Amino acid sequence: MYSVKILILDHAAALRRVYTVSRKLEAQSVARNMFLCNALTLKELQSVYAKRSTPVKAAELLLNIVMNQSDNVYSCFLDALKSTNNRHVFEFIVSASCKGTNKLFSSSSSVEA
């Protein structure tokens, strides 16, 4: 286990990068965890679950919901990725932001990886 310190400067831009891996995002499990943390409403959770027959659309819907929310919701999204079978998406977001060409994150706030 390692620790990554990140400050979310523009979570919408970071999430746009995730669209490239939306086929691998298990949106229902992430949405469920976010709902349990009060980061999604019941209506938002139900909307994601309604698209379970089309996983890519469910993932895109979840990403759209998160993009329009606060940094706290985005932090919950990152935690949900780590605690579900979606760690690869979390690692993609973090690694893509650490290459130096796209400064989406800086080292002020701590998120444990």
Image (cartoon, rainbow, N blue to C red):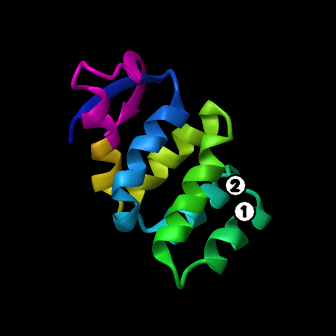
Label 2: how many Cα within 10 Å (few below 14, some 14–19, many 20+): many
- Total labels: the figure holds 2
Q: Residue at x 41, y 24 (%)?
A: 104
Instruction: Locate residue 93, reporting x and y percent.
Output: 34, 40
Q: Is residue 52 above or below residue 24?
A: below
Most foreground residue, 14 or 108: 14
Residue type at mark 2: give it.
Answer: Leu
Q: Residue at x 67, y 49 (%)?
A: 39
- In the rendered view, would you say 81 is above or below 106? below
Residue that mark 1 sits on = 44
Residue to which mark 2 is pinned: 40
Q: Are marks 2 and 1 in contact (CB under 8 Å)?
A: yes
Identify the residue at the far bottom of this view: 53
Q: Amino acid at mark 1?
A: Glu
Q: Estimate the x, y position of residue 106 in percent, counting from the top left.
A: 38, 16
> Who's the residue at 68% across and 66% down the image?
45
To which quarter of the image does residue 31 belong?
bottom right
Magenta segment range? 93-113
Mark 2 → mark 1, Cα distance in angstroms: 6 Å
Left/right placement of residue 42 relative to residue 84 reads right
Q: Secondary structure at mark 1?
A: helix
- Circle 1 packing at 10 Å, graded few (<14), some (14-19), many (20+), is some
Label 2: element kind: loop
Q: Is residue 74 left or right of residue 88?
A: right
